[in-house]
Amino acid sequence: MLHPYRITDLGGEKNPLYKDPKAPIEERVNDLVARMTLEEKVLQLNQYTLGRNNNVNNMGEEVKKLPAEIGSVIYFDTDAELRNGLQRKAMEESRLGIPVLFGYDVIHGFRTVYPISLGQACSWNPGLVEQACAVAAQEARMSGVDWTFSPMIDVAHDGRWGRVAEGYGEDPYTNGVFCVASVKGYQGDTLADERRVAACLKHYVGYGASEAGRDYVYTEISKQTLWDTYMLPYEMGVKAGAVTLMSAFNDISGVPASANRYTMTEILKDRWKHDGFVVSDWGAVEQLVNQGVASSKKEASLKAFQAGMEMDMMSHGYDKYLADLLKEGKIPEERLNDAVRRVLRVKFRLGLFDNPYTKKSTEEERFLLPSSLEIAGKLAEESVVLLKNEDNVLPLSASAKIAVIGPIGKNKWNLLGSWSGHGRDGDVVSVYEGLEAEFKDKSRLLYAKGCDFEGEDESGFAEAVAVAKQSDVILLCLGEKKTWSGENASRSTLALPQIQEKLAMELQKTGKPIILLLSNGRPLELNRLEPVSKAIVEIWQPGVAGGKPIAGILSGRINPSGKLAITFPYSTGQIPIYYNQRKSGRSHQGFYQDITSKPLYPFGHGLSYTEFEYGAITPSATVVKRGEKLTVEVPVTNVGERDGAETVLWFISDPYSSITRPVKELKFFDKQLIKAGDTKVFRFDVDLERDFGFVDENGKRFLEAGEYYIMVKDRKVKIELVD
């Protein structure tokens, strides 16, 4: 076994600068790069995998197959032993002892799985999301993972795209706010903390604009739209300190994101001064050949690297070709050195050079801690959106006989959602189990599955109808499998499979009120289910908390507070439909002739068991000049009989601009608990440049004199900006 301080390998130095924990990081980085060979530099820019083979007898063989100098691996295991085995090889068997960076897709939890990101956005509680990400970071880092490929902040207008589940909806600002919360939760105050991980903003950029919701395909994005719709969340995340980004799969108007110098170098590195690195998505480098921008993997590697991508995830292009490309003069040595510095800088910030190994711990010490489960439950609770509540059928009466029907009722696995990390269905509380605990000795539960998620088998309908006839109310639990959303999970329609809709129609014939409970990873087409449902409760895919908070909402113990972060269209045919569209040339024409042109449930919709009354919007001034401060307030009174939390969404509108703008733009939101009978004053401190200003096709912000409107719910006030 070789020792990392071998004098012969370090030119006689016993204590090289890069190994001095007291030296400034930049000095350590530069010292190390100066000592590295070409081959050592190249390997730092590649990512392989470790831990996909679950046969413990083969784990040692997995480590043997990996070079000691490898820069990073995606770590699929949950235990530190295998991870430390490879790290020991890197530290003791490589010439310079450079630690490996271990990454993993910790999207919405590692083992304590919390709601999918789309659900999280509906909580409008970034502080709670920050706490959940801190839980994920703790579990991941203690299990050997230093780096998460999260958050995903792709603004998405098409629910057919499966990856809407992974992001925070259709609004740029909302994605940005939850991005910042996630970065803070993952990275904390210092990356060297043994309970924090490096964040990775993805997918940079415009992936959410994939044509027709199909994954990996072309996106047509003008520079104006790139800046006014897609760039903001990434800029906010970079400013929050995110140390890495992941390039996207999509082709942006003829230049693929993974070979796009404008986005990866001119904007990210030159303009935003980001000093971390960019990693490709899985195989994205070699996929440049499929996209037609490169004729070979070698050329694809050249274009990706020249554009500003530092690390190649599983294309095996950089490890094969970068050295040759440098020797051929196609890659300047300084670009190679800069890329290596960026990767090493992140490793130093993570403290991997000084503390390369993960301490051994038991699963009980790492996972599903009481405090972690409490956070997951609270986030699931606040993510639920009450879409409809006709005649106040909810909350349920404690004396009711409740028929629990549908494929979601007792299912656990699908409540975890896509990208569920190392979550297990045994950790999940099913909807039925939650109801059992909530209504114990209060109400009688009856159950029938009725049908599966898909298919044509109607043999369970008769039992479901019989159970429904014995009940006072039907809780119809429908939705999607976890695999129906996420990567490579595009669907042609937002409607649930016909078998589920048929079940609802059969149950309607009983005359019993139907409460529709939905678990899904995207907005759904509900125009046939909505008329037969007295109430509709959107629970998304809530993670391990599952049915526990949902049961509390159905009983009335918990007052729902979620609001939609994405529009529910009336029909799939309305897509793309989103709240911040630009104005039409004819406001009285241009509508669909066969259906309504309005969504079924708009962005920001969400009901409560209490009523909130908004007062007049009061600005500190109605005429302002550039550079002046402006404060706007609105009182909100809980006029109902229950305490409840209300989220106030603050929009602005610039009706006339040299570059046309959306009909309204979300600029701030705030959520507060208001007790029954009380009034809370919500305040928006307006930054004129940021909130009234706009951005041009070069990303330059501008602010024009004229009239602006600040809007809250159905209230608005005019503000005049003068020069």
Image (cartoon, rainbow, N blue to C red):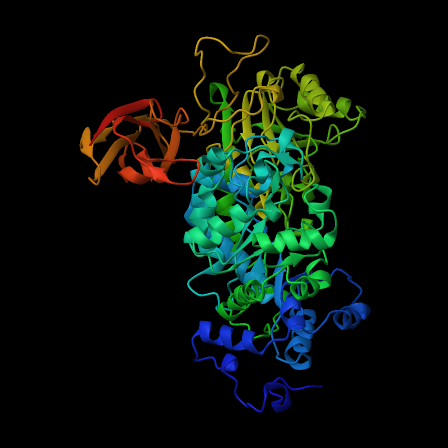
Front position in the image: 663 or 643: 663
Measured as percent of width and height from the top left, residue 168 is found at 51, 40
Q: Is the residue 330 above or below the residue 28 in the image?
A: above
Which quadrant would residue 576 be assigned to in this image?
Answer: top right
Which quadrant would residue 436 be assigned to in this image?
Answer: top right
Front position in the image: 477 or 683: 683
Identify the residue at image location x=73%, y=43%. 290
Measured as percent of width and height from the top left, residue 99 is found at 60, 73
Identify the residue at image location x=43%, y=29%. 609
Left or right: 699, with 710 as reference point = right
Residue 144 visible from this viewpoint:
no
Q: Is the residue 51 above or below the residue 357 in the image?
A: above
Left or right: 506, with 455 as reference point = left
Q: Quadrant of the N terminus?
A: bottom right
Q: Quadrant of the C terminus?
A: top left
Residue 199 visible from this viewpoint:
yes
Measured as percent of width and height from the top left, residue 83 is found at 66, 69
Q: Is the residue 86 above or below the residue 169 in the image?
A: below
Front position in the image: 494 or 237: 237
Measured as percent of width and height from the top left, residue 485 is found at 66, 38
In this figure, what is the number of numbered marks? Answer: 0
Identify the residue at image location x=60%, y=65%. 364
Left or right: 419, with 268 as reference point = right
Which quadrant would residue 491 be assigned to in this image?
Answer: top right
